[in-house]
Image (tube, rainbow, N blue to C red):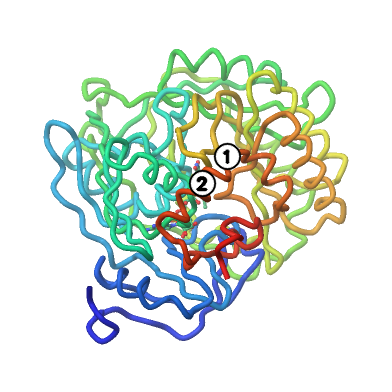
């Protein structure tokens, strides 16, 4: 093990850290280890600190990658990408490699990331710790189903885990929000594609029933599906929206000028939002006007060719769009419920309208079975994700009521997006927490690993100081 003196890493003084929603900043000492050995050394020495947690690109919305008063290990320098096995698509990567870089590297050779969240700006470590899902969950499951091995640095040493080698530790780490250790390396299986283009069917639906029935239908027909919901529409038009269902386009369907860009990676250049967008620019009226325009500009169209960056990651075109919500920030509320409770989707839209809370983005997806981990988020059924600017007076109480309703029907809120859940309701939503705690105690009996999220939710409470 390397010592304090030869870690070769960078350490900063205290830094204020936010999640993507910018709601609950806290100060921590940020370290940038340059190797797995340096990570081990910090874990070894962390005993006297107020806890330690890993951080990727800070794209979780809440306080998962923060540790007030403690140490935060940023993984950006664990950035090696090995060769991609030409037959199996397996590649060994450092945990700090972003999905953006992995995609750019793979696409040149005809490989795509197996599961992609709505942004490429997340690290492999972050994708494993949240076991992220994409538009293909109904077909391919979450990210960790495509990971065959991880190297995990813990306070009690280095563990190699995978679905076969130490599956208990592997699946606890998949969705374990960094609380079982720091992933330093992973083997990921990429998906073979013939082009960087998607063949997409777009359908416009005038109400929520029609939209949800269409999402059910396209599950069997397409690998990817997602719906944008207009949360401003009321009455008979409640929950109207636009459904996109797509598949990777085979090379022979990419013709004309696009053929010259067959495996072209996403554009590197992004635009930035000017820092001073006035707060009043986001209100129920402006959001309703935007939604109306968006709904009208998206007529039903079958079989369009779209570059995968526009299909998977449209928000990545704007580098820092989260600043438009101003200093108070925004929360993302994402819940999952089983098929029998699909009515919770329209009921949620009505509740938020009654609370006069504008929803700046609403995404509805279908889930297949979750992963075996005790903190796995998906379940067969529905998931709705809502971006909600902080401010409307009735919003906090409305969301607390919604937490209770989601929990009472066996549903749950996604920890990677959460910034506000209470302890009791969290325990109802994640009834296998004790299983998780048992695995965590095996690798971290002293409770060195800790985050603001873990403290807020009372995870690891019995052993953490
Ligand atoms: C615009 C946008 C769209 C999104 N869309 C989706 C989506 O469609 N589906 C979805 O599932 N998620 C989505 N997300 C959430 C995002 O994918 C997850 O929050 C992801 O975990 C962020 O990765 P990160 O590298 O930024 O990690 P961070 O936000 O920095 O950290 C997230 C968690 O991972 C842990 N972690 C990070 N690196 C490591 C490591 N090396 N070892 C152990 N633990 C680690 C941290 O401790 C923390 O608990 C979206 C986020 C944004 C901003």
The quarter in which the N terminus is drawn is bottom left
Q: Is residue 156 left or right of residue 391?
A: left
Q: Residue at x 33, y 61 (%)?
A: 153
Residue at the spot of label 1: 432
Residue 441: percent from left, percent from top: 47, 56
The quarter of the displayed image where residue 401 is located: top right
Q: Are marks 2 and 1 in contact (CB under 8 Å)?
A: yes
Residue that appears at 52% across and 65% down: 450
| Along the viewing direction, whichever of 46 and 27 lies nearer the viewer | 46
Image height check: is 462 above or below 165?
below
Give x and y (percent) for residue 420: 70, 55
Characterize the local packing of mark 2: few (<14), some (14-19) or many (20 or more) Cα atoms within 10 angstroms: many
Residue 30: name its quadrant.
bottom left
Q: At which x and y percent is residue 239?
A: 72, 28
Which residue is at a point 66% across and 39% down the rendered structure image?
429
Quadrant, the C terminus: bottom right
Density class for disc 1 (Cα within 10 Å; few <14, some 14-19, many ≥20) is some
33 versus 306 height, above or below: below
Label at residue 436 = 2
Find numbered disc 2 in the image and state the secondary structure of the residue it sits on.
Answer: helix
Who's the residue at 50% across and 65% down the image?
447
Where disc 1 sits, the SS reads: loop
- Of residues 398 and 164, which is closer to you in this image? 164
Query: In the shown orientation, is residue 110 left or right of residue 402?
Result: left
Quadrant of res 461: bottom right
Asked if the residue at label 1 sits under 8 Å from ligand 1, the reply is no
Pick whichever, 373 or 77, lies toward us.
373
């Amino acid at each position: 093990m390397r010592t304090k003196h030869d870690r070769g890493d960078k350490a900063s003084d205290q830094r204020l850290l936010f999640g993507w929603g910018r709601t609950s900043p806290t100060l921590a000492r940020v370290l940038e280890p340059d190797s797995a050995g340096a990570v081990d050394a910090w874990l070894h020495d962390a005993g006297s600190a107020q806890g330690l947690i890993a951080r990727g690109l800070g794209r979780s919305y809440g306080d998962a990658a923060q540790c007030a008063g403690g140490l935060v290990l940023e993984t950006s320098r664990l950035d090696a990408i090995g060769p991609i096995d030409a037959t199996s698509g397996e590649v060994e990567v450092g945990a700090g490699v972003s999905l953006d870089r992995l995609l750019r590297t793979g696409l040149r050779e005809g490989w795509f990331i197996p599961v992609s969240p709505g942004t490429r700006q997340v690290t492999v470590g972050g994708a494993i710790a949240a076991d992220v899902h994409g538009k293909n969950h109904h077909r391919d499951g979450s990210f960790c189903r495509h990971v065959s091995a991880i190297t995990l640095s813990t306070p009690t040493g280095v563990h190699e885990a995978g679905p076969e080698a130490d599956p208990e530790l592997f699946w606890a780490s998949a969705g374990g929000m960094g609380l079982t250790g720091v992933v330093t390396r992973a083997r990921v299986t990429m998906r073979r594609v013939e082009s960087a283009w998607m063949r997409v069917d777009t359908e416009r639906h005038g109400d929520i029933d029609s939209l949800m029935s269409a999402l059910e239908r396209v599950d069997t027909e397409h690998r990817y599906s997602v719906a944008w919901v207009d949360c401003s529409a009321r009455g008979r038009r409640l929950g109207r929206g636009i459904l996109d269902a797509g598949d990777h386009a085979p090379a022979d369907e990419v013709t004309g000028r696009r053929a010259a860009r067959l495996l072209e990676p996403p554009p590197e250049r992004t635009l930035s939002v000017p820092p001073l967008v006035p707060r009043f620019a986001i209100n129920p009226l402006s959001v309703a006007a935007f939604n109306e325009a968006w709904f009208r500009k998206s007529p039903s169209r079958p079989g369009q060719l779209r570059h995968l960056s526009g299909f998977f990651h449209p928000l990545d075109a704007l580098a820092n769009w989260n600043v438009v919500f101003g200093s108070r920030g925004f929360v993302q509320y994402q819940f999952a419920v089983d098929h029998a409770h699909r009515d919770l989707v329209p009921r949620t839209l009505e509740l938020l309208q009654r609370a006069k809370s504008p929803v700046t983005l609403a995404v509805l997806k279908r889930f297949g079975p979750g992963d075996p981990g005790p903190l796995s988020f998906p379940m067969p059924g529905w998931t709705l994700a809502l971006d909600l600017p902080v401010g409307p007076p009735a919003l906090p109480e409305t969301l607390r009521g919604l937490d209770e309703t989601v929990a009472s029907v066996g549903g749950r809120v996604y920890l990677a997006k959460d910034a506000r859940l209470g302890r009791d309701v969290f325990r109802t939503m994640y009834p296998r927490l004790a299983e998780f705690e048992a695995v965590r105690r095996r690798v971290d009996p002293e409770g060195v690993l800790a985050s603001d999220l873990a403290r807020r939710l009372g995870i690891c409470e019995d052993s953490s100081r």
